[in-house]
Amino acid sequence: MLKYLDDPDETPESGNENDDVTAQPSDAYISEDDVSDDFDDRTLPVEVDPQDMDSVLKQKIVGLERRISYLERIVKVGHMLNSVLSLEPLLQIIVQSATELTDTEACSIMLIDKNTGELRFSESTGGLTDALRELIIPLDGSIGGWVVRQARPLLIRDVKSDPRWHDNVDEALDFETRSILGVPLQVRNKVIGVLEVVNKNGDEGFNEDDIQIATTLAAQAAIAIENARLLDELQQAYRDLSEVDQLKNDFVSIASHELRTPLSVILGYATFLKDNVSGQASEQLEIVLSSAMKLRSLIDDMVNVRHIQAEEIELSRSIFSLKQLVVDLIDEFSDIISGKNLILTKKFVPDNSPLNIDADRQKVYLILANLISNAIKFTPEKGRIHINLELKGHKYWLNVIDTGIGIASEDYERIFDQFYQVEPPLTRKYQGMGLGLAITKGMVEIHKGRVWVESVVGKGSNFVVVLPSAPDVQDT
């Protein structure tokens, strides 16, 4: 009776004598009856004629050379599989290699669908037809299903006498299957599919070498298939993220455009009414104007972010005093600073210089305004803020230092991402859309500068900006 490779003493569950994985031959020994009495029952090897021995050795050498040749080809196939990252061409290489190495007429690969758990054809010799692609191989009562369930090779020398064979596969391929060898595609003790080689060429049929070759190839193929699948999933995830990102950009573009017109009307009428009324109505209109200005600022932020992403920003350079810009901004925020009883100090090095810079004034204004606004927002009442501006060589070093809530080290990079909030979105204490630092980073980098943060939670933060003093200054 025919046996399975991994357990030569076990009878197949089906009891079908066509199930076969050839067992390894055992060494031959003679009995005591063939030995002289002088040797006292000791067992000795059979004496072999030198010519017969030579013939046996030649056969063994030929067999070893054949196996070495197979192994060399499998190694080459392994290198080839590792170099192919796309699933479809990878499956084609596996099918072609399997038929060549086992000297068979055809090969097919069936993979388990990760979503449905169904076993389906993924590749076949001559290509995957629509009819074959639509076939679902049952895990119970089929050859492929048996290999998946048992996670062992299965050899059937006459498929027509095996009840697990379904001729609808042959009908779909317009092919006649006579014998079949199926081996599991297994990764980390998990079967992901089945590799089947069909119809051994020649009269001898499948042998032990075919089983070992198919099993070894299947082990390499399974890892390559799983890696290709993971890569496909990763690439699809990136495509999905890109689509989501594009939808977000489109929304920001449309929303900012559509909001600008009605907002301009509100600002115009509110300003007109405020100039023509007095008393309580004037105070209420002041609140309307303040809210409308905040909304316009948010819209401007969204537009700036979109332009930074699309790399559509152009610099309108001019030479201006960076020192004076800092002073103007401090005056602009003076009411908020005094309202929170904050202490703000500043230092310029050298102090007797205007500290001129060749840059886009409006964009540098956004850099400074966002950093100072953040320092004010996250510093509690009676806290301190210090602004230090120093010319070192041909670069300006700007420090905005506060005694605020601080930032955890794991958030140092993420705070410059769009819409990122350190606080939970539903329970956050501080207002804002999380665009200020993203805009700051974008504007700094457009000027070939750098920005980073140094912080201690509960102690405060130090935002550092380095800007070239002129466009021809290299960023080193």
Image (tube, rainbow, N blue to C red):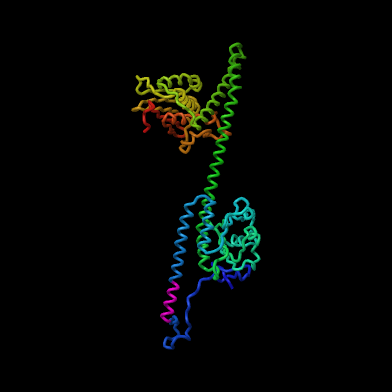
The location of residue 128, given as percent across then percent down, is: 59, 54
Place residue 251 in its image quadrant. top right
Q: Is residue 7 visible?
A: no
Name the side, left or right, on which 16 lies relative to 378.
Answer: right
Where's the C terminus, which quadrant? top left
Check residue 147 for magenta coloring.
no
Q: Residue at x 62, y 58 (%)?
A: 173
Residue at (53%, 71%) from the top-left corner? 23
Q: Is residue 73 above or below residue 420?
A: below
Q: Position of residue 7 (x, y in %)?
A: 55, 68
Residue 326: quadrant of the picture: top left
Q: Which residues are magenta?
A: 49-60
Which picture quadrant has residue 384?
Answer: top left
Image location (x, y in percent) of residue 214: 52, 62
Q: Residue furthest bottom?
A: 37
**Residue 56 is covered by the magenta coloring:** yes
Label the magenta part by its dominant secondary structure: helix
Q: Nearer the viewer, residue 368 or 110?
A: 110
